[in-house]
Amino acid sequence: MPLRFFNTYSREVEEFQPRDAASRKIDMYTCGPTVYSRAHIGNFRAYIFEDLLQRHLELRGYEVHRVMNITDVDDKTIHGAREAGVPLSKFTAQFKQAFFEDIETLRIKRADEFPAATDQRYIDRMIAMIGALISRGLAYQAEDKSVYFRINKFPDYGKLAHFDLTQLQSTGRVKHDEYDKEHIGDFALWKAWDEEDGEVGWESPWGRGRPGWHIECSAMATTLLGDQIDIHCGGVDNIFPHHEAEIAQSEGVTGKEFVRYWLHCAHLLVDGQKMSKSLGNFYTLPDLLEKGYTGPEIRYALMRVHYRTPLNFTWEGMDEARESLSRIDNWLERLRECSAGVQLAKLDKRQVGNLPHTFEEALDDDLNISAALGFLFETIRETNRAMDRKEFDAAKASAWLNWWNRINTVLDLEAETAELPAEIAKLAEARTQARLAKDFQTSDKLRDKIAALGWEVRDTKDGQKITRRAGEPA
Ligand SMILES: [Zn+2]
């Protein structure tokens, strides 16, 4: 069965056909963070969806070349740097670093490239693209010295968002600073310098200024991936105007179809509400780690709902994620005990081949992760029952372990199986004894002691499990 994805362009699930089917190489562009603050878990929902997409394509034998941009100049970053009283590059550096820490904690595969908008190479490309758009009549410099895209000259404008231009025209009032534009929907390609920009600015044929956000992505995408891209992703809130503008700019310059498949991830809600600082339901990754959840648990919680369905984040959901991962870990432990003595490498390939492919087939179907996970947990239930009844042999257990290793290249959820350092092992043994003696006070103290050393204790029906806390150095 071929891969199928919902293409925002057509609003239909389409069979996936990359530009170059023979080479199985795919170019993928994903809009990255704007580094003016620490990213929140809603951002990471989109990044985990993109990670799942990339890993599944790789499982299916594609070679994915992925670019994720870093927006390090825009209104918000400039405003933040001014408030903090530091240069823009210094202000954004801390959030770039935080972003890379967070994606590592969540086991999000790094893109092949993380271009930053302020890199001179891309500024040059932005200026060249704007120049080309002006020469084609697709852009103009207004009296305020800024350069705007002329949407009336681009007939396809609105095609992605399925947006009717007349809706824009009927908008009555125009903000004062936008009187200079020919059309209310024209968007800035180059913003003329003003006092609020301070030291931030680059020279251009239209005077000192800085790029608009949309042209940043068009320039970085076409520089690193060429005129045409197989897949472009982002959150649904990026569709209009950001991605619509990316299409207009890129196609306006190259004359070629910019993107074949547009995939967009739905919102994340917290307790059924939009996340916002004023509601006190705005969470970053460190907020969740502080509450004792691990990177894989958060990864699972953000991954388990189909990407086109809004995901409602709740603390119960986090606890369910913990429970689910512990079921996986216990199952793997049982399989490993059962398979003892059989080396995975020596396993007959046919045995693995006989295992169902339902997990992958579910993901082929527009990344249906809920169905894929449903199959995984059904498998866990059935094989556990078979192991209970002793109807399982080592070869069978090894075959399932191999199957797990294959699907875990997509999920990446397994707990780290680091050897316990002697000190931790001693404390753990003392805690086991305390629990056997029902001395829960001592047991709790030992748990805290172990936690203070960077390890997490979980009590399961098979005894305590100790894992390294996410983000702790090895
Ligand atoms: Zn973008």
Image (cartoon, rainbow, N blue to C red):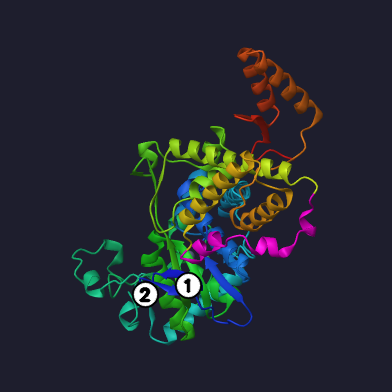
Q: Nearer the viewer, residue 307 or 138?
A: 307
Tell me if 400 is positioned left or right of 233 in this view. right
Q: Is residue 113 visible?
A: yes
Q: Tell me how far mark 1 sits from mark 2, CA to CA.
A: 40 Å
Image position of 436 with respect to 45: above or below? above
Look at mark 1 in the image and give the residue it sits on.
Answer: 207
Q: Is residue 323 above or below residue 131?
A: above
Residue drawn at x 50%, y 71% is 3
Numbered disc in front, either 1 or 2:
2
Identify the amino acid type marked 2. Answer: Ser
Residue position marked by numbered label 2 in the rendering:
10
Stretch of the chain drawn in magenta: 342-366
Q: Is residue 394 above or below residue 254?
A: above
Q: What residue is drawn where x is 51% and y is 66%?
A: 364
Which SS type dominates the magenta stretch? Answer: helix
Residue that appears at 48% across and 81% down = 131
347 is within the stretch colored magenta: yes
